[in-house]
Image: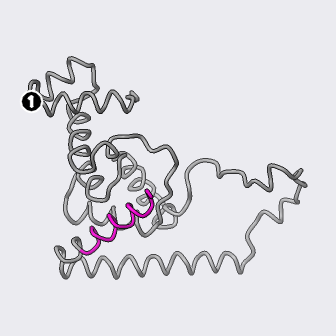
Amino acid sequence: MAKYSDEFKVMIVCEYLTGRLGYDALTKKYGVKSTGQLRAWVSAYQKYGVEGIMRKKNHEVYSVQFKLDVLSFMKRTGASRAETALHFGLTNPPLISSWKKRFLEGGAEALDNPKGRPAMPEKAKNVKKVQKPAQQDEMTREQELERENELLRLEVAYLKKLRAFQMDPDGYLEKHKQRYHSNSKKNSD
């Protein structure tokens, strides 16, 4: 997958917005993978400004509930990945596909597993790690039950939200759209 610099994306979006060239001409002129890619940049720019097309500098972690809300919205409304990403303020639409794949393969529990290697805590960097026996790495029965309870709570919350959405889709979406946008503004400050 081609990676484009933030400056390049801003430049090509601004050139499109001047109205001299269309999507097809600009993708050919600059060798962009597809017109769909350019359309997504333009939509994100129009909705969120420059921040909408800039690559995030820090890795953002989304809650399982947020991921379920995104997937539910996409399924219920029939919105595309790009439309769903714009609605929820996500700048990486393919992320939704990976959430969907993980959900279909392993349910809500699979959405809880962070991708990649977890960051090493500062304390562990400074202190020499002592080897533990393999048995200590496994979860106790109590920990397994606590995890299962948490996942069941998440599933119940998801089903409640789904029912609320089915009863009043427009009211539900408007209410949650405002909440997600206010939360994203708080997180960016």
Residue 145 vs residue 154, the one in the foreground: 154
Q: Position of residue 18 (x, y in %)?
A: 12, 30
Apparent side of residue 149 relative to residue 106 in the rendered image (left or right): right
* 56 to 138, vertically: above or below: above
Apparent side of residue 8 relative to residue 150 in the rendered image (left or right): left
Q: Which quadrant of the view contains residue 5?
A: top left
**Measuring 20% from the left and 19% from the top, which residue is drawn there?**
28
Q: Position of residue 10 (x, y in %)?
A: 29, 33
Residue 178 is covered by the magenta coloring: yes
Q: Position of residue 174 (x, y in %)?
A: 21, 72
* 146 to 112, vertically: above or below: below
Please tell me how crowded label 1 is: few (under 14), some (14-19), or many (20+) other residues with Cα within 10 Å. few
Which residue carries the number 1 mark?
Answer: 19
Residue 138 vs residue 19, the one in the foreground: 19
> How many circles with numbers are drawn on the protein?
1
- Magenta residues: mostly which secondary structure? helix
**Measuring 45% from the left and 65% from the top, which residue is drawn there?**
107
Apparent side of residue 85 relative to residue 28 in the rendered image (left or right): right
**Measuring 37% from the left and 33% from the top, which residue is drawn there?**
6
- In the displayed image of the protein, which residue is found farthest to the left? 20
In what quadrant of the picture does the N terminus appear?
top left
* 150 to 22, vertically: above or below: below
- In the displayed image of the protein, which residue is found farthest to the top? 29
Apparent side of residue 20 relative to residue 131 in the rendered image (left or right): left
Which portion, as a residue range, is magenta? Answer: 175-189
Instruction: Identify the amino acid type marked 1.
Output: Gly
Q: Position of residue 172 (x, y in %)?
A: 23, 76
